[in-house]
C-alpha cells in the first residue's frame, strides 16, 4: 500500500497470496488470491482507465483469469456499506483460485504482480507534483478516514489477523499515517469532491467491457 502526500496522487494497494493446508496435495487444499485497486481523492478518469487497462491486459494473457468478473468482484469487495461508497475506483480482486495446476495459477499471479509498476508509476508521475490547496489536503485526509473504516471494519485479512493474535504492527501497517473525520460533512454541489463521490457510489465500467 502506498499513500502519497499529494492529494492529487491516488493511494494504491496490491496484494497477491498463496494458501496451503497440509501438504497441499488434496483437492481444495491450496488456492491463490489477491488483486490491486486504486483509491483517488480526486478523480482523473484517464488514471482509472490506465490502471484497469494494464490489469485487463494481464488477465487476457491467461485463460484462468476473467477481467470482467474480477473487476466486479473488486467493486463488491471494497464496498463500504455504512457509507454506501466504494473505497476507490477499483481494479481486480479474486480469491479461491485453483486452476488445473498450481503453475497455471502462479503464472497469472506473477504476471499481475509484475504489472504493478506499469499500472501505478505513470499515474504517480503525472500527479505527485501537482499544486494543491489546504482544503484539498483536508479532503484527502477525510478520504483516508474512509480507507481506515474499510480496513478496520470490513477487510477480511485485517479481521483475521486481529482475531488470531497476529502481529499487530504488520496487520495495521497498511493504514495511512494520518486521517480525518468531520461530523455530518457534506460536499458542495458541482465540485470535484462531489464528482468523486458519484463515482464511488455507482461503480464505473472504465473500459466499456
Image (cartoon, rainbow, N blue to C red):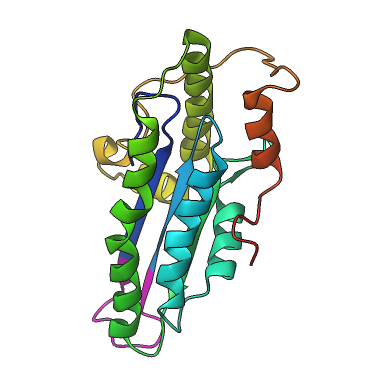
Q: Locate residue 61, reporting x and y percent.
A: 40, 78
For this orientation, the residue located farthest to the bottom is 100
Please state which of residues 11 and 25 is positioned toward the viewer in this rendering.
Answer: 11
* 50 left or right of 121 in image: right
Magenta region's main secondary structure? loop
Measuring 27% from the left and 62% from the top, which residue is drawn there?
A: 114
Q: Quadrant of the N terminus?
A: top left
**Is residue 151 in view?**
yes
Q: Quadrant of residue 199?
A: top right
**Is residue 163 in view?**
no
Q: Locate residue 186, reporting x and y percent.
A: 70, 17
Start and end of the magenta stretch? 18-32
* 49 left or right of 171 in image: right
Q: Locate residue 67, reporting x and y percent.
A: 53, 69
Q: Quadrant of the C terminus?
A: bottom right
Q: Locate residue 66, reporting x and y percent.
A: 52, 74
Eyeballing the image, is 25 above or below 205?
below
For this orientation, the residue located farthest to the right is 189
Eyeballing the image, is 92 above or below 143?
below
Measuring 30% from the left and 77% from the top, which residue is drawn there?
A: 107
Q: Is 27 one of the magenta-colored residues? A: yes
Eyeballing the image, is 198 above or below 134?
below
* 37 left or right of 108 in image: right
Please state which of residues 189 and 77 is positioned toward the viewer in this rendering.
Answer: 189
Amino acid at each position: 500500500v502506498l499513500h502519497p502526500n499529494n492529494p492529487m496522487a491516488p493511494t494504491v494497494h496490491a496484494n497477491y497470496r498463496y494458501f496451503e493446508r497440509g501438504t497441499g496435495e488434496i483437492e481444495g487444499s491450496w488456492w491463490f488470491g489477491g488483486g490491486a485497486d486504486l483509491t483517488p481523492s480526486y478523480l482523473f478518469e484517464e488514471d482509472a482507465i490506465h490502471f484497469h487497462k494494464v490489469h485487463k491486459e494481464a488477465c487476457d494473457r491467461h485463460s484462468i483469469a476473467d477481467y470482467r468478473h474480477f473487476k466486479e468482484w473488486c467493486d463488491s469487495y471494497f464496498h463500504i456499506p455504512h457509507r454506501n461508497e466504494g473505497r476507490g475506483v477499483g481494479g481486480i480482486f479474486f480469491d479461491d483460485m485453483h486452476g488445473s495446476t498450481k503453475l497455471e495459477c502462479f503464472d497469472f499471479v506473477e504476471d499481475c504482480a509484475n504489472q504493478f509498476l506499469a499500472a501505478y508509476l505513470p499515474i504517480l508521475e503525472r500527479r505527485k507534483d501537482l499544486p494543491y490547496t489546504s482544503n484539498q489536503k483536508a479532503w484527502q485526509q477525510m478520504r483516508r478516514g474512509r480507507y481506515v473504516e474499510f480496513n478496520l471494519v470490513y477487510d477480511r485479512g485485517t479481521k483475521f489477523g486481529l482475531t488470531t493474535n497476529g502481529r499487530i504492527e504488520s496487520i495495521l501497517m497498511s493504514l495511512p499515517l494520518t486521517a480525518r473525520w468531520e461530523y455530518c460533512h457534506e460536499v458542495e454541489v458541482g465540485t470535484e469532491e462531489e464528482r468523486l463521490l458519484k463515482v464511488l457510489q455507482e461503480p464505473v465500467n472504465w473500459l466499456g467491457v
